Amino acid sequence: MKKLIAAIACGIVFTASSTINAAVDFDKQVKPLLEAKCINCHAAPYKSGSRTKKPKAGLRIDTRENLLKGSDDNKVIKIGDAGKSLFYQRSILPADHDDIMPPKGDPLNKVELSVLKDWIDSGLKWTDGVVLKRKE
């Protein structure tokens, strides 16, 4: 009986930890978040009327490689450590802070922040060949 109880307890702990540490789904969670909140300011240069719009701070996030290159001044991602990643740090600033990202619209909510943090902490997985698109 003790072995049965121990086996059940181990199963519950394993299931709970699997759920807590479930991998973030890039295509279903991260890509829509980045396209909704980030890509319009951090896309490849594009024409708007007679002007060419460049990515803010020189940071492009349309591909994993570009995100890892960082901005004009800084690397913005430390893979495996959201707490040391400027990309995440700027998103958790107080809503009235000058450097919060995104600077316009609503700040990221708790679920979005959790997705972003978990994605960075779990290795910044990105589906091969995916290029984020800005809204036209």
Image (tube, rainbow, N blue to C red):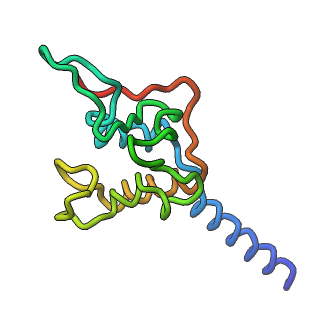
For the C terminus, the image quarter is top left
Position of 53 with respect to 11 (left or right) is left
On screen, residue 75 above or below 19: above
**In the image, what residue occupies the spot 24% across and 56% down?**
107
Q: Residue furthest left?
A: 49
Count every numbered label the image shows and give the total. 0
| Residue nearer the viewer, 115 or 39 | 39
For the N terminus, the image quarter is bottom right
Position of 93 with respect to 66 (left or right) is left
**In the image, what residue occupies the spot 48% across and 36% down?**
27
Residue 46 lies in what quarter of the image?
top left
On screen, residue 96 above or below 37: below
Q: Position of residue 59 (x, y in %)?
A: 37, 38
On screen, residue 35 above or below 21: above
| Residue nearer the viewer, 64 or 136 | 64
| Residue nearer the viewer, 59 or 32 | 59
Q: Position of residue 12 (x, y in %)?
A: 68, 71
**In the image, what residue occupies the spot 29% across and 55% down?**
108
Q: Residue furthest front?
A: 73
Q: Position of residue 98 (x, y in %)?
A: 20, 59
| Residue nearer the viewer, 117 or 64 | 64
Residue 38 lies in what quarter of the image?
top left
